[in-house]
Structures are given as structure tokens and as C-alpha cells.
Image: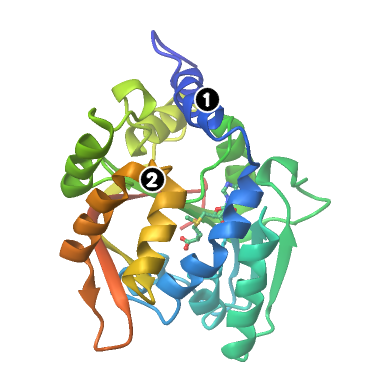
Amino acid sequence: MTGIINWNELRKAIVSEGRRRRSHERPEEMWDKRAEEFNKSTRGGSERTEKQVASLKLDPDYTVLDVGAGTGRLSVPIAKIVKQVTAVDQSGGMLSYLEENMAEGGLSNYKAIQKRWEDVELGVDIEPHDVVIASHSLGMFDLQEALAKMDAAAKRRVYIFTAAGKWFFDDQEEELWERIYDRPPRRGGGFRSDYMLLYNILHDMGIYANVEIRDSEHVQRYGSIDEAVERWKERREIPPENEPLLREYLAKNLEDENGGGLVFRRRTKSAMIWWPKSESS
Ligand SMILES: C[S@@+](CC[C@H](N)C(=O)[O-])C[C@H]1O[C@@H](n2cnc3c(N)ncnc32)[C@H](O)[C@@H]1O
């Protein structure tokens, strides 16, 4: 049931803006390109990952479905705990790192499915799982439909991890953006597509979810300042004449990681939204 605001349509309008800007490449191609950097930045675990996995309260006999599993940042430690993991992702590039990381951990109790979540058919591609998770992977246009499918795929609980407030930009990056483009970052016409939209969509669906907001640190790793400049230029479409501003910013903010490369840390907040299926724990 929707009230004055149709949250799902509002979110579609917000994500449409980003899709128009990135219409030159399909999302799976974008993630294929980012896979190596993403894997380098997230493999080996982190406090954030440990905390996420601990929140799921997993039992050894559970099956877990990871929607938008990426390189297996969560699927791999989860597979160490539970009976079986199904990792769905649209990007073959991300999934090939997931397979590599599973093999490195000596794990074979998983199935990787390369598909858009929108194209996954319940009962055909996958059967219901005890727990369904989606962590920073809500690239679906129709979020309500995607959430309804996650709910239908879960026997016990669903967990969504998503942004609370700023995500891609923290205050310092906003400052850089303003210097480079002479305007603040334009994200969804000033309306952020964070957990509040998701929460309201769930509410309209009759799902009254629990929310926990937590501090979250994201790490990006680079071999050199030149590599960092190249990656940021590519990802943020920075005009070549403004490269010196970017280089100055990165030189100030990249930390040396014990001589093993450079690390960029972004401190943000994230939300864990979860709900139990009725008559389960
Ligand atoms: C930021 S990564 C997060 C990966 C992993 N969940 C994690 O937390 O480390 C986002 C991933 O979600 C996947 N994704 C986004 N939208 C998707 C969709 N509609 N169907 C399948 N995969 C999707 C992307 O391909 C990408 O691998």
C-alpha cells in the first residue's frame, strides 16, 4: 500500500539520473572493470566484514543466498560457517575472484550463479535458503520487486546492508568535487538513495524491518599514487586539466600501508536492515 509518496517510484527516478550518466556501459561491464581493484581492497578480511558476518547469527546447518555477492567478501567467510552458500552476481569478473577466494580458503560448499537478480527465477535457478543477504548490491531498478523476491527466497531471515547518508563521498571528497567541478556533487537531485528509501519501500510492502546504524570504514588499496590517480579519474570522470587537484588531494589522503602499497580510508555510516520471516527466528 502506498501513501502520498510512492517510495519505489521515487527511487526509480533517483537511480534513473545515474543510469543516464552511465548509459555508455552496462552495470555488469562496469563491475567487470572494477573487479580487480575491489578484490585487492577487500580480500583478507576486515573488522567491518567480521561484524557483518557475526550479525547474521548463522548456524552450521544453514543455507545462505548472497545477492550481488561480488568477490565473495561475505560469501567466503560465510561458507566457512554454514552448510551451503549460493552467490548470485551479474558480473563474471567479480565472480571469478569469488571462485579464486573460495579455492584459496579450501571451500567448495558453494554455487556461483552469474545472473542479474532481476533475471533469477525462484524454483528454477534457486530454491529457498535459510538466510538471504544483499550487501551494498542493490543495483536493481525496481527495488520493490527485487526485495519481494529476496523475501520469497528466504526461509528464516533477510539482511540488507546499505548506505546511511553519504556513501560515495565523505565531507573531504565533497570539497574536492566542488573544487574540480565548481559545484557540489549531484546525487539524486539532492535526495540520497540510502536506507530510508529502502525502509519506506519495505513498510509499504507490509514488512516492518529492524534497522541498525553502524560506523563503517571502507578501504581502497593502490600500488602507487599514479594508479590511484588513474582509477579515480576513470571512476569519477575527472577532466584531465583538473588532474593536479586530484593528485594533490590523494597525496594528502593516501596512507602508506607498511611499505606494502597505499590505502585510502573512507569513514561513513551504514545500515543493517533485517527482518525475520513470519513464524521463524
Ligand atoms: C559493491 S559490490 C558489493 C559486493 C559484496 N556484496 C560485498 O559487500 O562486498 C556490488 C556487487 O553487486 C552486484 N550487483 C548489483 N546489482 C546487481 C543485480 N541487479 N543483480 C546481480 N548483481 C548485482 C555487482 O555486480 C557487484 O558485484
Q: Residue 36 falls in which quadrant of the image?
A: bottom right
Sequence-first tag of 1 and 2:
1
Along the viewing direction, whichever of 7 and 257 lies nearer the viewer? 257
- Near mark 2 (Cα within 10 A), the count class, few <14, some 14-19 or many ≥20, is few
> Is 151 drawn above or below residue 91 in the view shown?
above
Q: Is residue 54 visible?
A: no
Residue 240 got which mark?
2
**179 horizontally vs 187: left or right:** left
Which numbered mark, 1 or 2, is in the foreground of this view? 2
- Near mark 1 (Cα within 10 A), the count class, few <14, some 14-19 or many ≥20, is some
Looking at the image, the residue that sits furthest to the front is: 241
Residue 16 got which mark?
1
Along the viewing direction, whichever of 20 and 9 lies nearer the viewer? 20
**76 horizontally vs 112: left or right:** left
Q: Residue 165 falls in which quadrant of the image?
A: top left
Residue 116 got which mark?
none
Residue 211 pos. (x, y %): 30, 46
Along the viewing direction, whichever of 171 and 278 lies nearer the viewer? 171
